Amino acid sequence: MPTAPRSGRYSVFAIAREALRQHQGWNRAWANPQPRDRYQVVIVGAGGHGLATAYYLGKNFGITDVAVIEKGWLGGGNTGRNTTIIRSNYLQDPSAAIYDKALKLYENLSQELNYNVMFSPRGVIMLAQTEHEVRGYKRTVYANNLQGVSTEWIDPQRVKELVPIINLDGPRYPVLGGLLQARGGTARHDAVAWGYARACSDMGMHIIQNCEVTGVETEGGQVRAVNTSKGRIGCEKLAMVVAGHSSQLAEMAGFRLPIESVALQALVSEPIKPCMDVVVMANTVHGYLSQSDKGEMVIGGGTDGFNNYTQRGSWHHVEETVRALVETFPMISRLKMLRQWGGIVDMTGDRSPILSTTPVGNVFVNCGWGTGGFKAIPGSGWAMAELVANGQPGALAADFGLNRFREGRFIDESVAAGVAH
Amino acid sequence: MLALTCPCCGITAEETEFHPGGEAHLKRVGPEGADDEFEAYLFARKNPKGAHIERWRHSYGCGKWFHVARDTATLRVFGAYTTQSYGPPEDIVNAIRQSYPDWTFDRNAAE
């Protein structure tokens, strides 16, 4: 990354300087160029994963002839629609490796990007509310310790100390303990996309918004160009990083993905005073809860059981989620809910992502993060950049190839993690 | 929230009375199938942004499975029909073609 970004380096001195001149000197954080007719690498999708892929292509491999094209606006898909939870306490080794890589990169991301992503390692507790969950989470703790991912099993009293607003003696789902990852937490989701975008723009990459892909041009089994609403853009390599619309883009390139797109919902309450400084996930009752810096209680809900592209989910999931959470957190019963929204998540059969080469030469796909992609953004971008630059996956992405379905090598997190991934 | 009409008992109800069952008219692949066919049967679900034919069960009603033609881009329901069929009836195909004139049902996968 250049030492002097065109947007100016952000620091306490910059704030002081601008305070003295009425904030007239702030430049745009990233450029808004028209597309050239050719790039070495075209990345479709300017969400967190796409922008992180571009960033690590430049930083780790020196490839800066890159365009990131986006049909909507930067970070306007699932990057702007998630509940911002970051953790790496997965059961299977390949998952723990890539999610923990992401967590480690998040820890220094603000310094690295010179952009405050507000990473807050406040700790993540996954509540065990049935005997099955107790056994499942203890197994995950043992697995994590073998993987070098520090997590611990905590008893109900420790849960109560960390989360004073919790009700341990629920009539249906008493709190029997929890899996605590103290290094986990939250980050400001938009800032992650904005920070990567600014760094990419500083490296001379083009971020082109409002540019929808309408076709993929191939010749002799190799990608040649993408056709877009802003014209034909030639490329040597194409990376598809479009989450819920991966199936449509793959169809344009002539192959199929083992993906189904469904709506996942979240909602936030009115802002209240600080009452909970950890993230709590209650997977038995399909809900998770954290408090944002603004004071809103951020609540993640369930997915619909049917395919859907409308970015809104079925109403009864909100009711089910809130009803269950009120039992575990009685004090939220009087809260008014401010906003509810949905995002289209790309679900695979084993609930693990796909980072893979494809049947079309020099087309690479990064999708299938399902309901838990935000936490993976830096690790996903790191592994995807390696895949795109070298044409084959490195150690982090090796197990996440498309061929795992054909060969039966699932990275099965659907049973391991219950509802939330 | 979706409102579906069960073609078996004729009752119209909200989606909470039904259970979604995924893509309809899958062609089963047995031990004699090739690897490609078997992989496609197990994992390569259709995921269209538009008309989609899927299975639903009237789980809090008559209990029967049936088929629904639905638009995944708008949540519009084109119609429902019973499972004693290899594909959507003509009136439902016509309803779909009012929105998607080029739409055809992929019968090869069904029979």
Image (cartoon, rainbow, N blue to C red):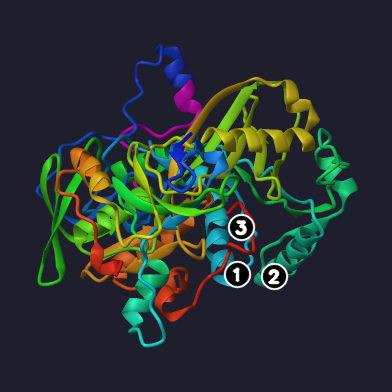
Quadrant assignment, res A14:
top left
Looking at the picture, does residue A216 appear above or below residue A293?
A: below
Q: Which chain letter matches label 2?
A: A
Can you identify the residue that label 1 sits on? A92
The nearer-to-camera label among 3 and 1 is 1
Q: Chain of mark 3?
A: A
Q: Which corner quadrant of the image does residue A224 belong to?
A: bottom left
- A167 to the left or right of B20: right
Front residue of A317/A299: it is A317
Q: Is there one chain holding both mark 3 and mark 1?
A: yes
Q: Residue at x 29, y 68 (%)?
A: B109
Disc assigned to residue A88:
3
Which quadrant of the figure contains the C terminus of chain A?
bottom right
For residue B24, side relative to residue B60 (left or right): left
Disc 1: CA contacts within 10 A as few (<14), some (14-19) or many (>=20): some
Q: Main secondary structure of the magenta part?
A: loop
Q: Residue at x 15, y 48 (%)?
A: B102
**Which region of the structure is painted magenta?**
A1-15
The location of residue A199, given as percent across then percent down, is 36, 43
Disc 2 target residue: A143
Q: Name the residue located 25 percent from the left edge and 71 percent from the top edge.
A: A359
Q: Is residue A419 visible?
A: yes
Q: Residue furthest bottom?
A: B32
Q: Is residue A204 magenta?
A: no
Crowd tier of the residue under label 2, counting other residues whose Cα lies within 10 Å: few below 14, some 14–19, many 20 or above: many
Q: Chain of mark 1?
A: A
Which amino acid type corresponds to the residue marked 3 in the rendered image? Ser
